[in-house]
Amino acid sequence: MLMLFRHILAAYDGSVQAKRALEKSVQMVDSCSGTKLTVIHAVNLYPLAAGDIMIAPTDAMSESALKRGEELLEEARLYTEGLCRVNTEMIHGSPSKVIIQQAAERGCDLIVVGSRGLGPIQGAMLGSVSRYVVQYAKVPVLVIK
């Protein structure tokens, strides 16, 4: 049985798995006439906890993260070029919470994420975002390896 979705949210961080997730999202949108795709990239500019130490991002770190976010969204725009109903957006906040929040606010009926991403230290907590999303999402989640 083919499940049709009205609005798919794809989280994109440039990792191999996120690229595969975006590719799968595009395939689904392409095969489901009228389906909307929103691609988001979450940028966490808030202090990070490292044990008992809080590490606040410097202006240079924040600027670099924002620049990288724009580059990733441009990459996603190029990949989704030709699809009618696509929106790309950078959102500030914790990736796992941003994904859940954006899916709810936008009325998405499917979330697509990569199984692993580029966490604070290039994946030191492999899969923590996808695990959180699967656990707390109110809609189906497709996790791509």
Image (spheres, helix red, strand yellow):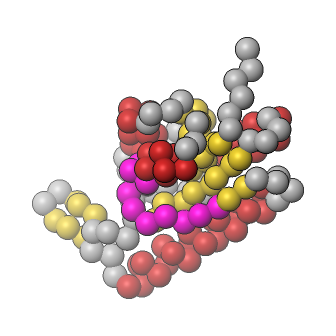
Q: At x 47% / y 81%, what residue is drawn?
A: 63
* Residue beneath the point at 38% across and 36% down: 136
State the image coordinates of residue 92 (x, y, percent, origin top left).
43, 66
Q: Which residues are magenta?
A: 88-98
Location of the C terminus (image quadrant): top right
Residue at (68%, 38%) from the top-left corner?
6
In the rendered structure, the answer to whether residue 110 lies left or right of residue 122 reads: right
Q: Quadrant of the N terminus?
A: top right
Q: Position of residue 34 (x, y in %)?
A: 79, 42
Viewer-proximal residue among 135 and 59:
135
Towards the viewer: 46 or 119: 46
Above-or-below relation of 6 to 106: above
Q: Quadrant of residue 57?
A: bottom left
| Left or right: 104 in relation to 29 | left
Q: Is residue 27 visible?
A: no
Q: Does the magenta portion include 91? A: yes
Outermost left residue = 52
Q: 6 and 98: which one is in front?
A: 6
Q: Find out whether residue 131 is within the magenta segment.
A: no
Above or below residue 131? Residue 52 is below
Residue at 49%, 50% in the rendered image = 105
The picture quadrant where one finds residue 98 is: bottom left
5 sits to left or right of 64: right
